[in-house]
Image (spheres, rainbow, N blue to C red):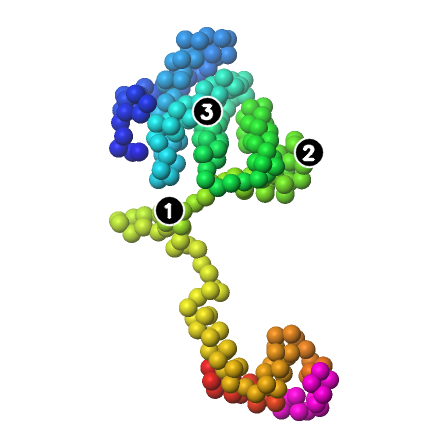
Amino acid sequence: MQMKVEICGVNTSKLTVLSGEEMNDLLHRVRDGDQAAREKLISGNLRLVLSVIQRFGGRGESVDDLFQVGCIGLIKSIDNFNVDLGVRFSTYAVPMIIGEIRRYLRDNSAIRVSRSMRDMAYRALQAKEAFVRDNQREPTIMELANSMGVKKEEVVFALDAIMDPVSLFEPVWGEEGDTICVMDQVGDTKNTDEHWLEQIALKQAIGGLSDREKRIVQLRFFEGRTQMEVAKEIHISQAQVSRLEKGALERIRKQI
């Protein structure tokens, strides 16, 4: 993506950049209905679209498609921008462009989400766009839920369900050829090789006990029974349970 110069017939190396004064003047003219100013504003912000689509590289998507979708987000930003609020155009436009691209990626995702969950997510996205348009900032989850009249948990679940999956091999940091992927930062302290070996050794050690000892170990350490409860269960004295338990644990320790 970074090496591609021509996207959708546009030579990205020759894209124009507007100054702050030009941007402000064109935005005011667009508000007054000047279509020529609108066209100039679109062409003058294509570099902004180009910078945004860099974030979505490595997904196997066509750069041309992402650029076109990003341009739709740019046009929506221009048409809905409120020049009276004193907010920088890029601050408003970037989230709009990102949202348009994410919507495109979700609609073309191979992961299937239930229709009700998808509908809830789209309602949330529409409510979010309306909030951004009116307030020139993104809403909190609570503000979004209140505007939709639903619980915040429903909004969170719906938006999470349609988020783009991330590959475990996606780089998150790299320097001098040493790359760290998502997988390198995902830790599992339970399903380690050492844990599996301990489980196998414990199973083998318990397997060497007598049936009565196995029963005592099961009741005491897997079901949480007291020695008195175990004694009543297997019809022996509490002192016998204590002696058998101690002997069983000693053999298990030696075996492990």
Classify residue 67 as left or right of residue 158.
Answer: left
Checking the image for residue 170, the label placed there is 1
**Quarter placement of the N terminus:** top left
Question: Residue 73's mark?
Answer: 3
- Which numbered dot is residue 47? none
In this rendering, is residue 46 above or below 256? above
For disc 2, the marked residue is 149
Give the extent of the magenta segment. Answer: 232-243
Q: Earlier in the sequence, mark 3 or mark 2?
A: 3
Q: Where residue 97 sits in the image (x, y, percent)?
A: 45, 28
Name the element at disc 3: helix
Q: CA distance from mark 3 to mark 1?
A: 26 Å
| Secondary structure under the numbered disc 1 in the rendered image | loop
| Residue at 64% in and 88% down | 242
Give how far apart the Cα atoms at labels 2 and 1 are: 37 Å
Query: Residue 125 location, x and y as percent?
Result: 56, 31
Residue found at x 48% / y 73% = 199
Amino acid type assigned to the residue bearing label 1 in the image: Glu
Mark 3 and mark 1 lie on one chain; the one further toward the N terminus is 3
Residue 147 in the image: above or below residue 200: above
Q: Is residue 224 visible?
A: yes
Is 238 magenta? The answer is yes
The residue lying at 61 percent from left, 37 percent from top is 116
In this rendered view, identify the residue nearer to me: 126 or 130: 126
What is the distance, in whole Å, between disc 3 and disc 2 at their CAs? Answer: 27 Å
Residue 205 lies in magenta, yes or no?
no
Residue 245 is situated, as x and y percent measured from the top left of the image, at 61, 86
Please, what is the three-letter code of the amino acid marked with disc 3? Gly
